[in-house]
Image (cartoon, rainbow, N blue to C red):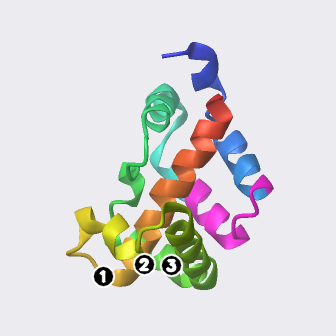
Amino acid sequence: MNKNALEKITFANIEKKMHAEEFDFKFINELISIFQMCNSDKKQKEFQTRMYNLHYKLPEEFQDQETCLKIYKVSQQWIENEVTRLENETKLPWEVQTEDIQKLDEKIRKTQLVIRHRLSEVVYDLIN
């Protein structure tokens, strides 16, 4: 694991990159707020390592269904647009992309799909 790459994974850099990629403002605020609330300064290295190893998995902060439903409600249109973009990019319907979380509500599945995919891309861009 590259130490310099890890140091690039900060809340500020993730937020800056999401703004540059034109993520929904409310979506960005929710994600950063949740990350900051769940990850104290003492856990920063752990957070950086988890994000470095994300690879299209959902961060533990977003496993909670209520959290995802709240994010969906504040950014519904943007999330729906991102789901469509992901379907076009991957050539797979969102239902196939979320087969591992089928038992959850559709809104939660879509939110988790967008979070894990787009956040993985953000982190990948930061470290490369």
Q: Quadrant of the C terminus?
A: top right
Mark 1 near mark 2, Cβ–Cβ under 8 Å?
yes
Mark 3 near mark 2, Cβ–Cβ under 8 Å?
yes
Magenta range is: 20-33
Q: Earlier in the sequence, mark 1 or mark 3?
A: 3
Q: Earlier in the sequence, mark 1 or mark 2?
A: 2
Q: Residue beneath label 2, please?
A: 69
Amino acid type at image mark 1: Asp
Measured along the vertical axis of the image, is residue 109 above or below residue 89?
below
* Residue 21 sits inside the magenta stretch: yes
Spatial CA distance of label 3 from label 2 is 5 Å
Q: Residue beneath label 1, please?
A: 105
Coordinates of residue 37 in the picture (x, y in percent):
51, 52
Coordinates of residue 42 in the picture (x, y in percent):
49, 29
Q: Residue beneath label 3, please?
A: 72
Q: Secondary structure at mark 3?
A: helix
Measured along the vertical axis of the image, is residue 108 above or below residue 32?
below
Left or right, 102 with respect to 25, comes to left
Amino acid type at image mark 2: Leu
